[in-house]
Image (spheres, grey):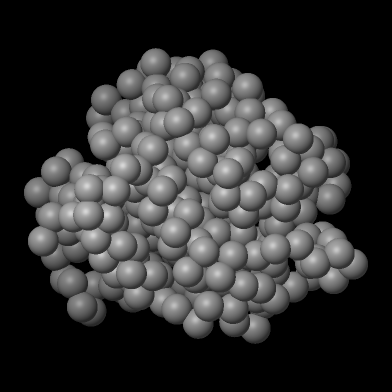
Amino acid sequence: MAEPYYDFGTWIRSRFQFRVQKLSVDAGFSCPNRDGRISTGGCTFCDNRTFNPAYCNSSKSVTEQLEDGKAFFARKYPDMKYLAYFQAYTNTYAGIDRLKSLYGEALSVDGIVGIVIGTRPDCIDDSLLDYLSDLSRETFVMVEYGIESANDETLRRINRGHTFECSRQAIEKTHERGILTGGHIILGLPGEDAGESLRQAPIISALPLDVLKIHQMQVIKGTRLAEEYARNPFHVYSVEEYLDLITKYIRLLRRDLVLERFVSQSPPELLIAPKWGLKNYEFTNLLRNRLLASADSGEV
Ligand code: SF4
């Protein structure tokens, strides 16, 4: 059945003749919002313990992590190919020679057909983008930016360390060079109600992004957000509230924007709130049904 939005699976199948799976890599990067270059506190919601699957561990080389990841999936899908997903922390936060070496190492592993690089919008420069632009003529390259919010007051409150204008410029520069460009946003950040998220939807949609990931605000143990939540609990969405919001949000996005995910589920032992007890695919099924029902009823 066709999805009521442009889903990542359909998009990625249009780019490759074979089944493709992302493999997370922790290449041992730091983050300037944690190591003191911008701040030592990090984003208030951030806990990198929730980033990485078990096969991924920075004490192993990029090659070892990818080989382990391949072994994990190959039992079920022997013909699968893979994208190396540089996920943990800030994956452009190093000199260009080191970056070229790490990305090159990933691409030299048998069965790796591209790279996805997660980073902050204030951690790219023209020389890196020029290099990635050249690389993207040979292989699949996507740069995925944490935008999180289009509201500078929220970005300050969560100690993000950059503005929305910074995100806009990074995304525009990346797109202009023909590099696939992804973005990540969070709905329900402290200080943002549903009305504010819906105000931002057309702003996010107007960015030259190829792919957007959306997820709900989660309060994770050990984070500064958890302290804020304990001191002064703010509203976190119930499943029903989030379903309602994201249905409206998606309908404000352009139809050619590929949507990769709608929720994130942190491990239950780390999660303080909201505790939905739903798997990602279960939420996506609920959302699909909601979107189809709202389209059938002619809701706008
Ligand atoms: S969310 Fe990303 S940018 Fe923010 S502190 Fe964590 S690793 Fe750094």
- Reply above or below: 172 against 98: above
Given residues 82 and 184, the one toward you in this image is 184
Q: Is residue 26 above or below residue 100?
A: below
Residue 295 visible to an observer of this rendering = yes
Whether residue 210 sits left or right of residue 204 in the image: it is left
- At x 31%, y 62%, the residue is 290
- Left/right placement of residue 194 relative to residue 284 reads right
How many discs mark residues in the rendered view? 0
- Asked where in the image residue 150 lies, by quadrant, the reply is top right
- Residue 247 pos. (x, y %): 39, 53
114 lies above or below 220: above
Residue 202 is left or right of residue 155, and the answer is left
- Please name whichever residue, 45 or 13, is drawn nearer the observer in this view of the structure: 45
Q: Looking at the picture, how far across and down is residue 63, in whole percent?
A: 43, 58
Q: Residue at x 45, y 78 (%)?
A: 278
Q: Is residue 181 visible?
A: no
Which residue does the image show at 72% across and 40% down from the upper left?
Answer: 154
| Left or right: 161, with 13 as reference point | right
Q: Quadrant of the N terminus?
A: bottom left
Say which residue appears at 89% left-offset and 67% top-offset.
231
Q: Quadrant of the C terminus?
A: top left
Q: Position of residue 295 (x, y in %)?
A: 22, 51
Instruction: Where is residue 264? Give x, y as percent.
Output: 50, 64
Depth check, front residue: 300 or 98:
300
